[in-house]
Amino acid sequence: MSTLEIYCVTNKQVNFLHETDYKIAWVGKEKILPNYISCNDKNNIFYKEKYYSELTFHYWYWKNLMNLNNNSWIGFCQKRRFWIKPESENEKIDIKNIHDHLLRSPHKSWENYEAIICKPINTSGSKKIKMLKRGWRSLIKKPSIFFNKEDESILFHFDMHHGYGNMHKAIEMLDIEDREEFREFVDTKNYFNPHIMFIAKPYILDKWFTKLFFWLSRCEKEFGFEDLSGYETTRLYAYLAERYLSFWFKKHTRFLENPWVFVEE
């Protein structure tokens, strides 16, 4: 029977996880805490953490720890967002009771699947004043966005928050296999599976990481690092990965969506 290993990537201490079998991966600048996993040694991209966020550990895991002969499910979450049991989706969960709901083992519903991704969030419903202030260039091209929430696509949301035109430039860096389909995906869908959280078998992880980091390395030639500033643009590479994840796992794997929860200590 397969087991489940989950790595929580964080730059802050996550005390309640100390009582679980979750593995805690450290991407913080401060001194690493005891029993936390460092990704600042061996084959690493720790110097890019400011721009890559939790992908910094994902890369390290892929290059240094992943075992393709391992049949376990391998998963990733982050410091305030955690996987929960499917049965707990409608429960009110906080720091006091999260131990009762935290996902700890493969669920019976996963039997015919090879990847698990977060249940999606919607990109529609932006405040009108924000749309006018930050999305005016998109509105000039497609005025219906302002009046129809269904037209508030992934692309419109990304252009508003992470640099107008950056997604289109990044798509041009994508290989031909996915380029046009991904372009259509971000331009027509108004929801995506968030947080760069996923659970999969190692052979799927290897395919995903290979594709993702090759694409991001090409994107670096377009965007670099020095001109990336501000909370919503500095981590451009992580935001690109988040949107691409939704597309890639749905196209290339037998996937299932699983609930998650936001909990802060």
Image (cartoon, grey):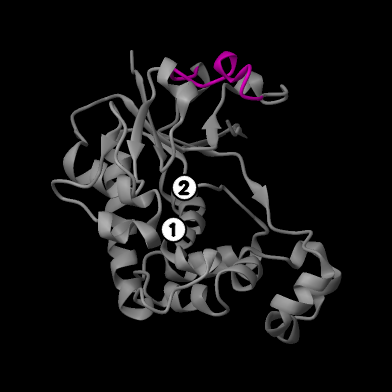
Q: Which quadrant would residue 119 be assigned to in this image?
A: top right
Q: CA distance from mark 1 to mark 2?
A: 8 Å
- Residue 153 at x, y percent in the picture: 67, 65
Q: Residue at x 39, y 24 (%)?
A: 22
Dot 2 amino acid type: Ile
Whether 183 is drawn above or below 18: the answer is below
The stretch in magenta equals 94-107
- Residue 265 at x, y percent in the picture: 57, 30
On the image, numbered disc 2 is attached to which residue? 196
- Residue 123 at x, y percent in the picture: 69, 58
Residue 101 left/right relative to 252 = right
The front one of 242 and 233 is 233
Q: Residue at x 61, y 68 (%)?
A: 161
> Considering the image in quadrants, where does the N terminus appear?
top left
Q: Residue at x 50, y 16 (%)?
A: 108
Asked if residue 97 lies in the magenta stretch, the reply is yes
The front one of 177 and 138 is 138
| Callout 1: SS | helix
Query: Which of pointers 1 and 2 lies earlier in the amino acid sequence?
Result: 2
Q: Residue at x 72, y 23 (%)?
A: 92
Whether 122 is drawn above or below 226: the answer is above
Dot 1 amino acid type: Ala
User: Do the CB atoms of the residues marked 1 and 2 lie less than 8 Å apart?
Assistant: yes
What is the crowding at mark 2: few (fewer than 14 residues within 10 Å), some, or many (at least 20)?
Answer: many
What is the crowding at mark 1: few (fewer than 14 residues within 10 Å), some, or many (at least 20)?
Answer: many
| Callout 2: SS | loop
Asked if residue 230 lies in the magenta stretch, the reply is no
The front one of 150 and 17 is 17
